[in-house]
């Protein structure tokens, strides 16, 4: 087995995994989960944790009050519990001398192009500095219109944003079964699923803990999103021995959903299918040849002209001097900023704008036409 087959791993931990089906966070098991994540981190992998449990932590902090299940009440519990949950993660990773960083997201952060890029850049910087991101939905402020709705689907979106090649959905079930194993003794674990169709969706059951939001159906939704973004997905029992390290090393654990495409190429396809470009960047002939031959990033110094009005995160055409389309890409600067720095060498951008976001269009955000 390839020790580093998976280099960027998203680990989604459900409420049932963190509480063991009880009303409180299970510190002993959280230490075990941290130990496994640290093992992957020390192998040189990037590890991202999507952690449920804020509302459960809030209930615990307030001594389990009898409350109605309304949106404001859940937001209140999340506001109380999120800091408690994050402190618990911070304390446990501190045992191993590893820093963690909190990132709270909503669906709006994923759907809005500039927020998407900001989230991606933040994740990138955390991982670059070997800091483990701890991500949760921003339940304290999210409304129904902007909520992802459950951390299963949030983890799939995180896998997309981060360009992960593996998503683990750890839950209170060992994986997807041919029937509900809680009521059918003949139910068999399905080791691998290549197509998520209506027949597979009918196999999905619900959550048994009563503390979480998502059941098996949401995990199938998440698996479908993540595998289309180029990540392998595994649904497995979060309390199985060494479940995180075993999955990351390629062992047959739970139910695996192989990626539909290579993650890099799938991202290129996403760019091509993005909203129609609303501006253009005209480049010199030397750059035009380099883009075609080496797929390098597009630097500001190679831009001759900027056409149209667009913002950071928008899609643009990249044209040669004869106005032939060479590529499409997602810009890291708005049109006004690019107009100010076109022809400008990289070391002078900070002085010109007061900030620098790297190349005008990164090669990972560009597809050749």
Image: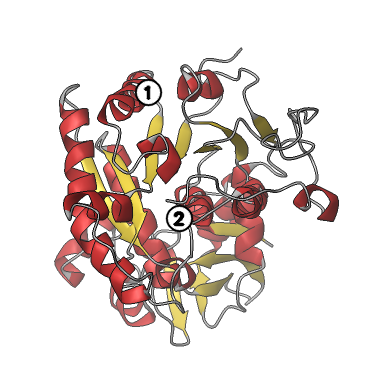
Of residues 143 and 268, which is closer to you in this image? Answer: 143
Residue depicted at 38% across the width and 48% down the height: 52
Q: Residue drawn 24% across and 68% down?
A: 76
Above or below for 78 versus 219 = below
Q: CA distance from mark 2 to mark 1?
A: 24 Å
Q: Is residue 130 above or below residue 123?
A: above
Percent coordinates x, y for residue 164 in the rendering: 50, 41
Question: Residue at label 1?
Answer: 44
**In the displayed structure image, the side of residue 29 where residue 282 appears, left or right:** right
Q: In which quarter of the view is residue 304 placed? A: bottom left
Q: Position of residue 186 (x, y in %)?
A: 80, 28
Along the horizontal axis of the image, is 81 left or right of 237? left
Q: Which residue is mark 2?
A: 362
Sort mark 1 into few (<14), some (14-19) or many (20+) by Cα contacts within 10 Å.
Answer: few
Please state, as top left, top right, bottom left or bottom right, where the C terminus lies in the image: bottom right
Extreme bottom residue here? Answer: 309
- The structure residue drawn at horizontal position 34% and vertical position 71%, both measured from the top left corner, is 68
Q: Position of residue 281 (x, y in %)?
A: 49, 74
- The residue at the far front in this view is 66
């Amino acid at each position: 087995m390839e020790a580093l087959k998976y280099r960027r791993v998203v680990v989604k931990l459900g409420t049932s995994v963190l509480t063991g089906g009880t009303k409180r966070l299970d510190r002993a098991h959280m230490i075990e989960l941290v130990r496994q994540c640290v093992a992957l981190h020390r192998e040189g992998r990037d590890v991202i944790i999507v952690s449920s449990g804020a509302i459960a932590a809030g209930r615990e902090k307030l001594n389990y009050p009898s409350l109605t299940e309304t949106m404001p009440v859940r937001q209140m519990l999340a506001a109380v519990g999120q800091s408690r949950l994050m402190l618990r993660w911070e304390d446990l990773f501190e045992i191993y001398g590893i820093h963690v960083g909190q990132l709270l997201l909503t669906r709006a952060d994923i759907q809005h192009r500039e927020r998407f890029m900001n989230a991606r850049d933040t994740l990138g910087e955390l991982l670059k500095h070997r800091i483990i991101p701890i991500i949760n939905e921003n339940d304290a402020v999210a409304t129904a219109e902007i909520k992802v709705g459950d951390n299963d689907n949030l983890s799939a979106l995180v896998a997309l944003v981060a360009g992960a090649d593996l998503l683990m959905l750890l839950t209170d079930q060992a994986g997807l079964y041919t029937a509900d194993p809680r009521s059918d003794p003949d139910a068999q674990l399905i080791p691998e699923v290549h197509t998520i169709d209506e027949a597979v969706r009918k196999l999905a059951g619900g959550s048994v803990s009563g503390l979480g939001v998502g059941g098996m159906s949401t995990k199938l939704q998440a698996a479908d999103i993540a595998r289309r973004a180029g990540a392998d997905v595994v649904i497995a029992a979060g309390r199985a021995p060494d479940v995180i390290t075993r999955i990351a090393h390629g062992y047959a654990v739970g139910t695996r959903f192989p990626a539909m495409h290579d993650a890099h190429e799938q991202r290129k396809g996403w760019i091509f299918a993005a909203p129609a470009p609303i501006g253009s960047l005209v480049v010199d002939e030397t750059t035009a040849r380099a883009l075609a031959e080496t797929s390098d990033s597009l630097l500001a110094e190679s831009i001759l002209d900027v056409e149209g009005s667009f913002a950071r995160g928008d899609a643009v055409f990249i044209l040669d001097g004869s106005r032939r389309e060479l590529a499409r890409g997602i810009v890291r600067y708005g049109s006004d900023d690019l107009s100010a720095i076109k022809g400008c060498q990289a070391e002078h951008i900070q002085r010109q704008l007061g900030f620098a976001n790297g190349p005008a269009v990164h090669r990972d955000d560009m597809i050749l036409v």
